[in-house]
Image (tube, rainbow, N blue to C red):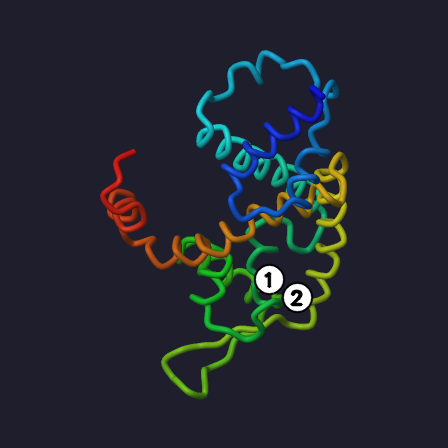
Amino acid sequence: MEDVIEVLQRWAEYQKGHPTGGFEDFCRFYLARPKGKRPKASNFEKAQPADTDSMFMMTVSRSTLAFWVYMRIALRDTPLPTVEDIMLCAALFNLGESRKTDIINFAMMEISTGTGNLNRLIEKGFIEERIDPDDKRSKLIVLSSSGAKALKQCFAKAKMARDIFLTDLTEDDKKLVANILNPLQEKHSKLAIARKGKSIEEIHKEVMGDEKK
């Protein structure tokens, strides 16, 4: 009976944090956190933030930083040895022929940094550039054949980094986290770029309204 009560309590807690989540999502969430199988907290874990927002953002940001460490190692001996190079080339791979600003924004980089990196990739022959036939003042860029070949090699290395990072998660774990985070990234990958010229106070007011944090 105690187990039933615990499941009901956790179901109620889950609904508060995931109001659109279904029962199948809750089951994956529950099974991913079985009783008695959590490791003892380390000193580092004990020092983690107490409030939920800070804990959430620390988990996401440090997970991303850890993955980038693996990525930098993976790309070290490839034709595109930096994370920025592969981000820009992957953006071109996904979007096809585009303007530089569109690629830089898709990769969520600063214009000056992205422009410098793109120009370097053009000089190395990984990206080709031509005048936009619809606007002679603009230029269009596209992956060259050597760029596509280099990116394919980097994707193979990136998969190894991804395998290492995700090795302890089940398929259901990954689906659950993706379902939770995907709406967040879809919203803010657009919002952040559209508002990057504003102050954080202005963005906060637009997003949060008059709510005081």
**Residue 1 falls in image quadrant:** top right
- Residue at point 43%, 58% (across, down): 190
Dot 2: what SS?
helix
Task: Please tell me which residue is depicted at 47% across the width and 29% down the height of the picture.
Answer: 52
Front residue (pair 136, 159)? 159
Dot 2 corresponds to which residue? 147
Q: Is residue 171 left or right of residue 197?
A: right
The circle drawn on residue 3 is none
| Residue 183 location (% of width, % of height) | 52, 53
- In the rendered image, the residue lying farthest to the top is 43
- Nearer the N terminus, badge 2 or badge 1? 1
**Screen quadrant of the C terminus:** top left
Q: Amino acid at mark 2?
A: Gly
Residue density around tag 1, few if under 14, some if 14–19, many if 20 or more, within 10 Å: many
Q: Which mark is residue 89?
A: 1
Is residue 81 shown left or right of residue 136? right
What residue is rendered at 60% in x and 67% in y? Answer: 94
Determine whether label 2 and label 1 are within 8 Å by CB: yes
Q: Amino acid at mark 1?
A: Cys
Outermost front residue: 1
- How many angstroms separate mark 2 from mark 1 (CA)? 8 Å
Q: Position of residue 59 (x, y in %)?
A: 55, 32
